[in-house]
Image (spheres, coloured by chain):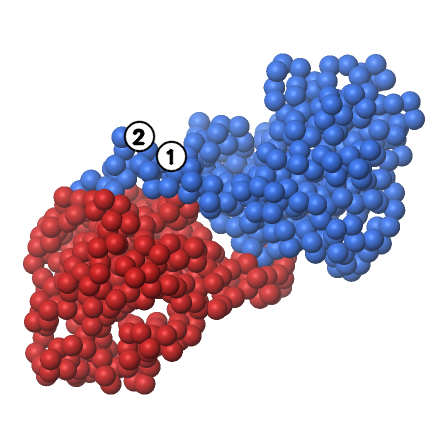
Chain colours: A blue, B red
Amino acid sequence: MTHQDRGAADGTPRLLRSGALQLETGGRLPEVSLAFRTWGRLNPDGSNAVLVLHALTGDAQVADGPEGAHGWWRGLVGPGRVIDTERYFVLAPAALGGCSGTTGPASAAPDGQAWGSRFPFITLRDMAALEARLLDLLGLASWHTVIGGSMGGARALEWAATQPERVRHCVVIASCAASTAEQIAWAQAQTAAIRLDPAFRGGDYYRHDDAPRVGLGIARRLAHLSYRAEPELESRFGRAPQGAETPLGSPDRQRRGRYAVESYLDHQAEKLVGRFDANAYLSLTEALMSHDVGRGRGGVDAALGQLDAVEFFVAAVDSDRLYLPGQSEALAAALPGKPGVEYIHSSMGHDGFLTQAEQLEPQLRARVFG
Amino acid sequence: MTHQDRGAADGTPRLLRSGALQLETGGRLPEVSLAFRTWGRLNPDGSNAVLVLHALTGDAQVADGPEGAHGWWRGLVGPGRVIDTERYFVLAPAALGGCSGTTGPASAAPDGQAWGSRFPFITLRDMAALEARLLDLLGLASWHTVIGGSMGGARALEWAATQPERVRHCVVIASCAASTAEQIAWAQAQTAAIRLDPAFRGGDYYRHDDAPRVGLGIARRLAHLSYRAEPELESRFGRAPQGAETPLGSPDRQRRGRYAVESYLDHQAEKLVGRFDANAYLSLTEALMSHDVGRGRGGVDAALGQLDAVEFFVAAVDSDRLYLPGQSEALAAALPGKPGVEYIHSSMGHDGFLTQAEQLEPQLRARVFG
């Protein structure tokens, strides 16, 4: 990446070919590519680099792109936003193990075939280790800020715990210090649905015409429900039928019509299936199940208590039922200086971290991006 | 059923062969059997008959049985309990469409083969219509009480709405007037997992060696999670591994070990799969999705507002996240006389209606079983 590159063509996809990566659990990827996008310019003293980390099925398109693409966090990142791309140099990498350009299960292994079932187990620490190569590439000592929500928040926290000397501010939104029994349980059901799909073929489906679309769609239904809240579903759909369909069932119950909420979830499932790889979903989901910032560090409190050098900002969505506000409170209470929790007020549940993140603008401006 | 029968052998399984049943949605079952159990004796004026209705995967074993079997509601029903089988004559039928003795998808159709995919769509009203034949059999004008929790509560409410002149008290615990968008959504994911299982074979799997065990197991995982609450899971399991298993994953992620909560849910799934038929699960789940006491009656308020002749008792579990306490409050507010809501205080979530129902004993004794 040259200096000229850094300011040109905001949001253009880039690829860092990065050699081998040794993994936390003992595996090794012999050749890793890291896809990312950037916005803004690195300033002369290199003090304005912000790393933005996406959630489970997110990608590097955090802000609006050159071809009119909308960024998934455009409320926070862009010209004039709190993460002002006129002032900050924003980098957004695609996660290791995913399917948005960075090496993942659908990538080619050394034998030229897709990794598939052979893709190794990935953790959030492996993602951070790979992303650290972006700092090296830029010749920077540290990020101004590492920020993310949901799994992105967990990734940001792991960044701070793994390399605290390279993170000045860490912003953790709608996330937690360690995935809980409940989060693991919902995730397990999702992975089981994918693996049940006969088209999954043990993970080696790439050479076949079909893919585990139904299984991945069920996983997405469950995930989507956990991302939203009951009152919104009730007010939007209630018991309404989908169009002229007859959900009550005809005498032939095999041809039962759908309720509107079923059609809505079918649509959410189809959208995800159209843009996401089932093995990548498994890889990232199991990485998130493994999330525990205290692993190998004497537990969560010990791991967090020593991070004095990092300024933390913790936020939650008040209606979140996947990452409960209490988990953010516990995280903040275990951090040096007990920074407290800022709140997004939303009826939407967890997804409020995406759709209503701009509520945090005053606090983020006061404490991080001043 | 003779008078002598009525008091003999509490909990003995019985079967009523009941002829044809016309169904609400237009189907017809040419020959229906109704399995039930009874406890206690019908008194001379026939005023002490209590109908107890089970939940989705429940059965007729509501109280302790003759061979040492434990009843699923033994905290409420039995000698000396609030539904005192020394004073009340208790009948517990197995639901139509299930797999506990009453006609369901695994039963033989007229051609001698299992109904399988041909089993018609069933509603809670069909269940009540069939159960009314027990009243006829006993020569009774009305039940002293119809009582149930969860789907059993919905069934009790439908009983009161369908035949209010035959129900003196109606007890609805941890249930609602109409299944909500959220309840429908969770149910849809469960049915999709069953149908995805290659062993499901469109519902006609009875003649094969395998059954959709994995799909039914996923459904049960989801259901079980909705029946419990997050704090209990966290305090019981946290992030503990299962025994010596390594959930973090070896380099070969296909052989990842399990977290303890995964093993727990595997166990819950296996238990259900060992005792329940997948088609029955679908039939009952879709019946519950169809639950709407206002259907064809001008809506919930109109349907409930005219039930002056029935004494209602409504209760909820304070930590229930499947049947939200607000739904019980809304139900009670729509009933004549606005009876209010009694609460089971529990950290367990929905399943508190089973495990801690005896908390309702004083209120039930004061208002229903005095």
CB of mark 1 within 8 Å of CB of mark 2? yes
SS for tag 2?
loop
Task: Tell me which amino acid carries mark 1.
Answer: Ser
The answer to whether residue A223 is above or below residue B311 is: above
Q: Along the polypeptide, which appears first: circle 1 or circle 2?
A: 2
Q: Is residue B221 visible?
A: no
Quarter of the picture containing the C terminus of chain A is top right
Residue appearing at x 80%, y 37% in the figure: A366
- Name the residue carrying label 1: A263
Toward the viewer: A128 or A71? A71
In this orientation, which residue lies closer to the viewer: A346 or B205? A346
| Residue B344 visible somewhere in the drawing | yes
Query: On the image, numbered disc 2 is attached to which residue?
Result: A243
Q: Taking B284 as reference, is A88 left or right?
A: right
Q: Which percent across, then down, holds residue B212?
A: 35, 50
In the displayed structure, A142 sits above or below B274; it is above
Q: Is residue A319 left or right of residue A79?
A: left
Q: Identify the subunit bearing mark 2.
A: A
Q: Position of residue A309 (x, y in %)?
A: 88, 46
- Residue at (83, 44) in percent of width and height: A311
x and y percentages locating residue A272 in the rendered image: 50, 32
Q: Position of residue B194 (x, y in %)?
A: 36, 47
Q: Are marks 1 and 2 on the same chain?
A: yes
The residue sitting at 27% across, 59% down in the picture is: B336
**Few, some or many residues within 10 Å of mark 1 (<14, 14–19, 20+):** some
Left or right: A370, with B173 as reference point: right
Specify the subunit that label 1 lies on: A
Report the front residue among B227 and A57. B227
What element does badge 1 sit on?
helix
Give A144 or B100, whichever is nearer the viewer: A144
The three-letter amino acid code for the residue at tag 2 is: Gly
Against A210, residue B347 (above or below) is: below
